[in-house]
Image (cartoon, rainbow, N blue to C red):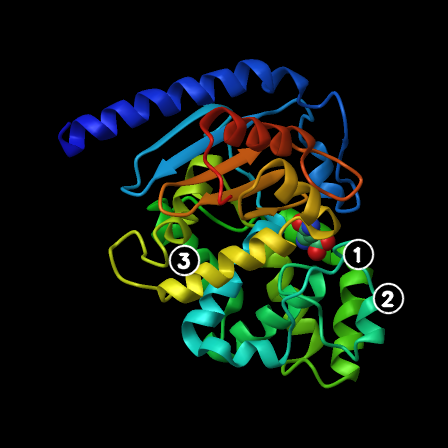
């Protein structure tokens, strides 16, 4: 087969898999789990929504369900801020944040005090606040850097902040403020707490579609190479980001996610999950009803089904 014929065959197979997932998992969306309401502006979405998109290495994207409807990416943004900081300063970040699974809820304070203000990993809230702090120092505009990267990789200038979500989170952000102040008390923030929180909330508020998020994450499937062919991360750094996603991307359910899905993944309380099949695909699911650990119930089920049907996993 020629390369275009192979791509057409792969796309045909992938479409069939996505269609099956829509039929077999889609109807369960919203039956179990709850939409996040601790950020009131997030609670307005329909829990029965379901979308799934897949992008291949060339950027060719297909999807099913509500894959073209924007949603709040929330913690999925943490992968992109991490990648941007690593791209600028490499390993230095790891002096201020660890890379072990936390085994605790994403917004837990307990471990942070025991471990002297050094968060376990960059994908829990405390760790992401450190990453945002660093990105703010390095670029002067952390939230802008994340949004501009997402726009560039998706090729979609409609990707933007949702001011209502950002404000809503700021108004109900006591726990994140507590995490940030605790880290500041240990000297692990460089910028004023208020600035770090502001950039973090706005970064989390970014709204985009499954299709655009799958496209934006595909540099991780291409081992660090961006949509325009330039390199963001070395192959080894891209492997490391994928590894941290695998071990920490679903918080205290990371073990269960690895067991069921077998791919690096990052969830957000907006109901999105970005997952990577290194060397093949970038995937994004969206369904807003979350389990008690903050991961989308139907999203995890859809990715579980995807790897079962295709046999594609990192294992
Ligand atoms: N898990 C998440 O998506 C949490 C992100 C949310 N912005 C928070 O800080 O609480």
Image disc number at residue 110: 2
Name the foreground residue: 46 vs 232: 232
Q: Is residue 283 left or right of residue 4?
A: right
Q: Quadrant of residue 96?
A: bottom right
**Of labels 3 and 2, the one closer to you:** 2
Task: Classify mark 2: residues with Cα within 10 Å, few (<14), some (14-19) or many (20+).
Answer: few
Q: Point out the tag, 2 or 1, that comes first from the N-terminus.
A: 1
Q: Residue at x 32, y 20 (%)?
A: 12
Q: Residue furthest left?
A: 2
Q: Point out the tag, 3 or 2, that comes first from the N-terminus.
A: 2
Residue 36: x and y in percent read: 75, 40
To which residue does mark 3 refer?
149
Q: Is residue 237 above or below residue 278?
A: below
Q: Residue at x 34, y 51 (%)?
A: 222
Q: Residue at x 58, y 37 (%)?
A: 261
Q: Secondary structure at mark 1?
A: loop
Q: Is residue 115 above or below residue 226?
A: below
Q: Residue furthest front?
A: 315
Quarter of the picture holding the N terminus: top left
Is residue 163 visible to the viewer in this orientation of the structure?
no
Task: Classify mark 1: residues with Cα within 10 Å, few (<14), some (14-19) or many (20+).
Answer: some
Q: Residue furthest bottom?
A: 187
Q: Is residue 149 left or right of residue 4?
A: right
To which residue does mark 1 refer?
104
Q: Secondary structure at mark 2?
A: helix
Image disc number at residue 146: none
| CA distance for labels 3 and 2 | 33 Å
């Amino acid at each position: 087969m020629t390369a275009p014929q192979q791509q057409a065959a792969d796309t045909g197979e992938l479409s069939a898999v996505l269609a099956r997932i829509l039929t077999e998992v889609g109807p369960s969306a919203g039956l179990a789990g709850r939409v996040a309401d601790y950020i009131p502006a997030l609670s307005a979405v329909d829990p029965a929504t379901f979308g799934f998109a897949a992008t291949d290495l060339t950027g060719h994207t297909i999807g099913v369900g509500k894959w073209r409807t924007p949603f709040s990416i929330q913690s999925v943004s943490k992968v992109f801020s991490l990648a941007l900081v690593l791209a600028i300063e490499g390993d230095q970040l790891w002096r201020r944040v660890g890379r072990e699974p936390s085994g605790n809820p994403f917004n837990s304070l307990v471990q942070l005090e025991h471990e002297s203000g050094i968060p376990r990993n960059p994908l829990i809230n405390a760790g992401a606040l450190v990453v945002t702090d660093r990105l703010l120092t390095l670029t002067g505009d952390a939230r802008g850097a994340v949004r501009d990267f997402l726009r560039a990789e998706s090729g979609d200038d409609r990707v933007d902040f949702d001011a209502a979500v950002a404000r809503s989170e700021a108004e109900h952000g006591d726990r994140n403020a507590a995490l940030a102040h605790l880290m500041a008390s240990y000297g692990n923030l460089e910028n004023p707490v208020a600035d770090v929180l502001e950039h973090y909330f706005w970064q989390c508020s970014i709204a985009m579609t499954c299709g655009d998020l799958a496209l934006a994450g595909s540099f991780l499937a291409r081992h660090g190479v961006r949509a325009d062919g330039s390199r963001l991360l070395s192959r080894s750094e891209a492997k490391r980001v994928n590894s941290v996603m695998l071990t920490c991307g679903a918080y205290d359910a990371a073990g269960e996610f690895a067991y069921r899905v077998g791919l690096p993944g990052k969830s957000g309380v907006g109901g999105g999950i970005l997952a990577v099949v290194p060397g093949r695909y970038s995937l994004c699911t969206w369904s807003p009803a979350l389990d008690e650990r903050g991961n989308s119930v139907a999203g995890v089920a859809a990715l579980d089904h995807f790897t079962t049907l295709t046999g594609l996993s990192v294992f």
